[in-house]
């Protein structure tokens, strides 16, 4: 979009996603659920997928009354063929794809000695391989009219900690893939970006350990955990006209952790 076209639009028009068709993976809970809801409330028609059909149904129920629609299909994206199935199903349901949000994730905390190859491969398959394959499968549709890809990476895609090498390898890879595909598609009207959430209160994080929770809060300059919805609206920005000149970027949303 030419920047001049933004001058005549209201903020509501700039962030309006009416008529846009989106895929959100890992949308049965947490950050993925909130992203799906934010896109639907902004007018997009959203196809959501995850392994838990019950979780997807709950997301769809929460989206009732939104300006856009939500359709669901339970899928495990670890097998490579599932990514093609996801894109085909979304295309059938929505009539095309304008926005792809790769959010599906899997974590595993252990030292390299205690992480076997099968675990490493599972984490990489979910966090990195599925994202690459979904972008590849959706490539033609994303380039038909100018699409948006938002990959959900992590602060651990930019730095490292101990005893989490599989997840860190996958998320570092996802940041790199985001940059590489952004360069490939930069002149084709497609923007490819990532967000890097910091400590976020989701089902993937055990906040019942009070000592650990207090220690984590001390590491965050803002002094609190993020909520999943605080990751969702930056995705809407990147998916909207407001983000048309942003590509190859990883937006860190971590309360200041990586600024230290």
Image (cartoon, grey):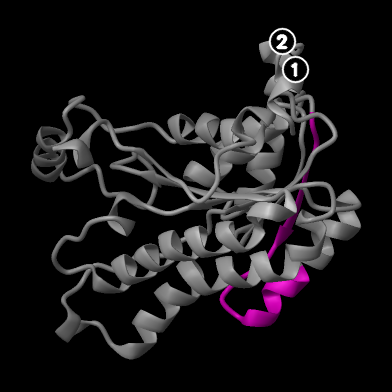
Seen in the image, is 139 located left or right of residue 229?
Answer: right
Task: Answer whether residue 73 is magenta in the image.
Answer: yes
Whether 22 is drawn above or below 61: the answer is: below
Return the mark for residue 10: 2
Identify the residue at horizontal 78%, vertical 56% (top origin): 143
Q: Position of residue 132 (x, y in %)?
A: 58, 70
216 part of magenta stretch: no
Residue 233 visible (yes or no): yes
Q: Quadrant of the N terminus?
A: top right
Tell me which residue sits at (71%, 40%) in the image.
Answer: 60
- Residue 111, position in %: x, y? 16, 76
Question: In the picture shown, does residue 231 fall above or below 106?
Answer: above
Q: Residues within 10 Å of mark 1 (few under 14, many from 20)?
A: some
Residue 83 placement (x, y as % from top left): 68, 71
What's the magenta region?
A: 68-85
Quadrant position of residue 25: bottom right
Marks 1 & 2, CB-CB < 8 Å contact: yes
* Relative depth, front residue between 104 and 152: 152
**Can residue 23 be seen here?**
no
């Amino acid at each position: 979009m030419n920047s001049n076209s933004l001058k005549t639009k209201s903020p509501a028009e700039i962030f309006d996603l009416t008529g846009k068709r989106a895929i959100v993976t890992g949308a049965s809970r947490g950050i993925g659920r909130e992203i799906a809801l934010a896109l639907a409330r902004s007018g997009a028609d959203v196809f959501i997928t995850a392994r838990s059909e019950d979780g997807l149904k709950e997301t769809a129920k929460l989206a009732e009354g939104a300006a856009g629609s939500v359709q669901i299909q339970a899928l495990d994206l670890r097998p490579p063929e599932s990514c093609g199935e996801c894109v085909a199903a979304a295309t059938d349901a929505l009539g095309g794809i304008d926005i792809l949000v790769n959010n599906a994730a899997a974590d595993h905390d252990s030292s390299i000695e205690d992480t076997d190859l099968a675990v490493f491969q599972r984490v990489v398959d979910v966090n990195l391989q599925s994202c690459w394959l979904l972008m590849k499968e959706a490539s033609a549709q994303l380039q038909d009219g100018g699409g948006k890809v938002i990959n959900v990476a992590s602060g651990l895609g930019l730095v490292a900690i101990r005893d989490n090498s599989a997840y860190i390898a996958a998320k570092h890879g996802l940041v790199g893939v985001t940059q590489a595909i952004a360069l490939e598609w930069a002149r084709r009207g497609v923007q490819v970006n990532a967000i890097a959430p910091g400590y976020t209160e989701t089902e993937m994080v055990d906040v019942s350990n009070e000592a650990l929770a207090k220690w984590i809060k001390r590491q965050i300059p803002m002094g609190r955990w993020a909520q999943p919805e605080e990751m969702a609206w930056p995705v809407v920005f990147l998916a909207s006209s407001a983000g048309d000149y942003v590509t190859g970027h990883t937006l860190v949303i971590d309360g200041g952790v990586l600024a230290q």
